[in-house]
Image (cartoon, rainbow, N blue to C red):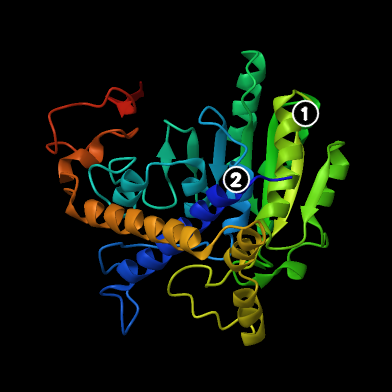
Amino acid sequence: MIGVTELQDMYDDMVTARYYEERLQEEYLEGKQPAFDISAGPIPGELHLAAGHEASGAGVCQHLRDDDTVTAPHRPHHIAIAKGVDLERMTAEIFGRETGLSRGKGGHMHLFDSDVNFACSGIIAQGCPPAVGAGLAAKKRNEDSVAVAFLGEGAIDQGGFLESLNMAAVHELPVVFVVEDNDWAISMPKERITDVADGSQRADGFDMPGIRVDSDDAVAVYEAAREAVGRARDRNGPSLLEVQVHRRMGHFMGDPETYRPNEDSEAAKARDPIDRLEGDLRGRGVDETTIDAIRDDAHRRVDDAIRWAKEQPEPEPADAYEDVFTNPPSGVTDTEPEFGFVGGEYR
C-alpha cells in the first residue's frame, strides 16, 4: 500500500505543476490580448499546457531516480517538475533567458536538464527512440537505471513509437512507455485517428505487458508504474502503460477550441486529479493544515522561480551562433564554429 509520504510527495508535484501553468498562462497572455498575437508578450511562440495531466507525471516519476532517463512530449511541465528539473532554470528557459536550461534557445518544448536526465521535444513520438537508446546504454553498462518515454495517444500510430516498441522488446530493454490519453490529438477526437480504443493493446504485438489506468487517479498510476518500472529495473524487459487524463485547456494557448463540445470541456474540469488526491490524503489522516502548507509552499516556489527568471538577462544576439551546428554569415563573427558546414565541408 502506498505510504503517506509518497502521497504527499505526489501532491506536492501536482499542485506545483498546476499552479506553475496557471502562472505561465498569466505571463504568456500579457500583450497577446484582445487580439491574439502569438509573437507578443514576455513568452513568444506557442505554449502547450498540461493542466489535468498531473497524475501521470507524479505517479510514474515517484519511482524514478536522477540517473533514470525521462523523455517527454511538447506538453512537458508536469513531467519535468515530477522528475526534479530545476524550476528556476526551466522557467528562465521558457522566458528565453541566458540562464535557462539551454541558454534560452530551446523554449518550453525543448527542455534539457542533464542533472536529472530529462529531455523533451515538440516532434510527435520523438522521445521514444532516445529513451530506447538510454535503455540500451544502461543494459550494456550493466546498470539498473531505467528509461521512461511519455507520449500522447495521438502518437501511438507513429513509426518512431512502434519501432521503439519493437527494439525495446527484441533486446529486452529497461524502458517504460507511458501514453497520456486525453482523448484529443490536437483538434481530432481519438476515435478519428486510430481504431485502438485502448492504447495499451499496442503492447500485444510486441509481446510486452500493456496496462491501462482508466481514471485520473495518481494512486492508481503509482501502483501501475511500480510494476512497470520495477520490471524494467529488474531487467525483465519493457512495458507499455496508458493513463487516462483530461486536458482542461486547448491544445495550445490561444486555441479557440471550436472543435470541442462544451460538455467535454466541463467533464474534463470535473475530473480533477488534484481533488481526487486531496481526498486520498484526508482519508489517510492528513489534516487540512498540512495540505494547505504543501500547497502554499508550492505556490511560493513557483512565484519565486518566475520572479527570478524575469530578472535574468536575455542572450546576446551574437550568441545565436553558439551551441548550434551552423556557419554564421560572413562578418557576423570572427569565430568559426567547431562543428558544422565550414569552408565548404562538414566538420
Q: Quadrant of residue 235?
A: top right
Q: Is residue 24 left or right of 209 when viewed as pictured?
A: left
Residue shown at the point (49%, 53%) measured from the top left = 12
Q: Residue at x 48, y 68 (%)?
A: 252
Where residue 66 appears, as percent x and y from the top left, is 50, 31
Q: Position of residue 242 (x, y in %)?
A: 73, 52
For residue 117, side relative to residue 205 (left or right)? left
Three-letter amino acid code at disc 2?
A: Glu
Residue 158 appearing in the image: no
Disc 1 secondary structure class? loop
Q: Label 1 amino acid?
A: Gly
Q: Nearer the viewer, residue 161 or 223?
A: 223
Q: Is residue 304 left or right of residue 228?
A: left
Q: Which residue is mark 2?
A: 6
Q: Position of residue 253 (x, y in %)?
A: 44, 70
Say if 198 sits above or below 247 in the image.
above
In the rendered image, which residue does mark 1 sit on?
237
Q: Residue at x 59, y 35 (%)?
A: 64
* 16 or 344, nearer to the observer: 16
